[in-house]
Amino acid sequence: MSAHGPVFRDNPKLDPAVAGTLVKGGYAVGGLALLISVAGGFAGGEETRKQFFFSYLAAYMPFVTITVCAMFFSVLHHLVRASWSTAVRRVAENIAGNIPLMAVLFIPVLLGMHDLYHWSHHDAVEHDPILKGKSGYLSPAFFVARAVVFFVIWFAIQHFFRKNSLAQDESGDVSLTYKMRRLAPISTLLFALTISFAAFDWSMSTSPHWFSTIYGVFTFAGGMMGFFAALALGILWITGRGALTSTLTVDNFHDVGKLMWGFMVFWTYTGFSQYFLIWYGNIPEETIYYITRQNNGWMSVFILLVVGHFFAPFWILMSRHTKRSRAMLGAGAAWLLLMHYMDHYFMVMPVLHHHLHFHWLDLTTLIAVGGLFVAAWAQRTVKHNLVPVKDPQLLASMGYENAV
Amino acid sequence: MSTANYQQETVFPPPLVEGNQTFHSVTEAVCRVVEAPPSKGWLASFAMALLGLAVLGVSVGWLIWEGSGIWGLNQPVSWGFAIVNFVFWVGIGHAGTLISAILFLFRQKWRTSINRFAEAMTIFAVICALLFPTIHVGRVWLLYWALPIPNQMGMWPNFRSPLLWDVFAVSTYFTVSLLFWYTGLIPDLATLRDRAKSKVAYYAYGMFALGWRGANRHWQNYEKAYLILAGLSAPLVLSVHTIVSFDFATSVIPGWHTTIFPPYFVAGAIFSGFAMVLTLAIPARKIFKLEEFITVRHVENMNKIILVTGMMVGYAYAMEFFIAWYSGSAYESWTFINRAFGPYWWAYWIMWSCNVITPQLFWSQKIRQNMTASFILSIFVNIGMWFERFVITMSLHRDYIPSSWDYYRPTIWDVGCLIGSFGLFFTLFLLFLKFLPAIAIAEVKGVMPQADPHWEGYHADHHHSADHAHAAGEKHHG
């Protein structure tokens, strides 16, 4: 920290004209892609309809995990009383603001329940003792009820932390910081439980016989990495538009890059734990998951994840130099977002396709969810201050430097 | 600073060192513990610890003479106290490296007052841990077979066995922790050397201080070495207990084979490690008058980590139970029901009570800041975490064939080894407290306000603290 400390002198607002293209373009492209996907998916027969729902779920999961992990980041900031993250917190709060959008976008998953989740077929369950055993949990009514509970909890947490943060922009009241700190622990607890069970419900139960205790932690790890990649792109985009150039500096990029790298490694750790223990134990009821995903062309996606989601970024992003370079950090974050998508694709798509088989609906559904996601975020970003301007920790956050 | 003041919440954390400390007074306060003749309390504790060590000597001596039949092992419980104690002690050994390495990499400056302490504890705990697999092999004199040493018989260890990975994981962990601890000690050993009154102390501290003179170049090399060792240690915090969890999880035994084991064991290790740091630090800060360095805030922070990691193990217990039911596997669900309501139900509920339920009291700030309550709750966690490993191991007692079911009862020699390991641990720890600085003197100075060259106290116009700063500047070299 310099002798006199930093001073906040940036314009806290983004010029609406600058973001206009992203908002309008995002809604237009996303909306159009959604229309094409729905039309294309339902114009064909049963196979295309199934394809639509699976493609949609594979596109939905990476974005919903990023959204709730952004919410968790804004909670975590208060839980550990961090100050370094103040300057980037609003970006996270604005990503978390997409929770209502994600709730709306969950409707197609509910409509496609019959195509996505084998356990939702009453007659199939009747003749399957394993599925019958878990029908107390995996039943359509309980599934919907749980999803409602998840979204209500997420919305409440997101709303509370964002509302108070925005209120502090006006009043500068320190007591709002204390208020948020007080609710951070319970929010963390609720987040841990909801994201785990959401992962079990929406993703793991597509293979209803299979189970893994680490699945929730694994989904969380990937989601956090995806969130930090989105955060990196967010602050690069904002500063690239000429805003906040003296508030968000290379040291903020470096910090976000470090955490993105850290959670990338944590994803690998949890993924390796799952794979390794199942491989070593070699019990058919568990190995079936990886046998499906290592044969009939799926092995190439498996290797892509091992190399592209771990080895390559591990070495490339480990360097201080790459994390402090706008171009390299941006490219790394974009690549990891793609890997985050491939991770979820690899979890759900082999259930539909025994053989690796890309479909044009994979692309259109991804553009649909992604376009709406980005547009909604950009819209919120233009509307409010880009940083919590009156947060008592903002100046300290600006002053951090990463020593050699 | 009074306790009432302390509780008032501030946006920025309060200072890490309390009282009107100068650089010199820090040196004095820490070195005093080492330089003063041993107190009666220390001597009495040391005598107790030596007694425990003697119990260990007798138990292990008889074990090696007579064989592992003197333990309560049976079929199907072929892994008894030895594995439980091993995992227990390795787990305790995790807080040291977490505090030294991970909190260092996260720039958590509050770690400086407790890291020395925790690192020493880590090393002694790992020594205790290594003892158990060693004596459990039966023929101790053939232990070198576990190492890949070329020989004419063409014998080679089985690299596919997680027990062999343990040999590498734990010994690597021990080596790196020792190096890390020693590197941090060098500047402080030089301080003790420079203050030494007797020739013996002068040469002893001098030899290990490696000619440290506090030169600029020394500090530069030191900082770089410290950062590199921190980077190397950070993955070790995760790897060691991950490998320990593999001892169980790579098998196909219900209750052991579950994918959450690696992170669950790591969380449990950090949990138990922090509890042991508190168990040791709370009395030590009082006895040696180090309350201004290991402050209420330090204890409170550790209590928060205990609360968080306690809920992480709670999450794992609950997930295991849920997925055991969800899996539809009759053996899995039965194992968990047997844990909770079978012959070892009491161990299972001790585990839940001490690891998940009682730490919930730490939601209250009053309790987090109360030394007596924190001490008692830390003991609960120690007990609970020992029982967690006991519960896991006792999954063996009812295997697939009801006719081979049995009940494991420890013999006096099992108990002797457990108590004896505490004797070993406390002997080493008390020696550490007496001969080495229990608080990292140089590092604590680095987080004091005076360490900032722009500290307001250095400006003459702030006369309220000018004297203080003046003193600090003059006595910089303590």
Image (tube, rainbow, N blue to C red):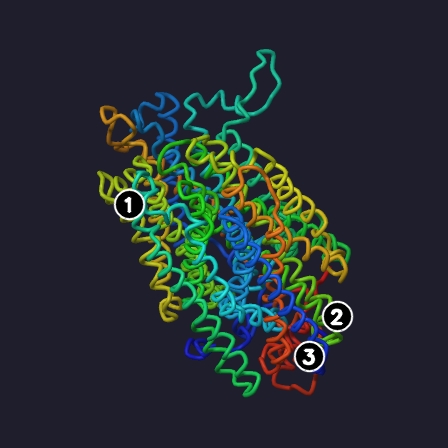
> In the image, what residue type sits under mark 2?
Gly
Marks 3 and 1: same chain? no
Locate residue B375: give its quadrant. bottom left
Quadrant containing the C terminus of chain A is: bottom right
Is there any visible trace of residue B176 in the rendered image?
Answer: yes
**Residue receiving disc 3:** A14
> In the image, what residue type sits under mark 1?
Tyr
Q: Considering depth in this image, is A105 or B368 the residue closer to the camera?
A: A105
Locate residue A257: give its quadrant. bottom right
Q: Nearer the viewer, mark 3 or mark 1?
A: 3
Q: Considering depth in this image, is A339 or A37 the residue closer to the camera?
A: A37
- Looking at the image, do the residues carrying marks 3 and 1 touch, with CB atoms under 8 Å apart? no
Q: Quick check: B324 above or below A372? A: above
**Residue B229 % position (x, y):** 65, 48
Which chain contains the residue that carries disc 2? A
**Residue receiving disc 1:** B348
Label 3, label 2: how many angstroms apart (C-alpha)?
11 Å
Q: Residue at x 42, y 37 (%)?
A: B86
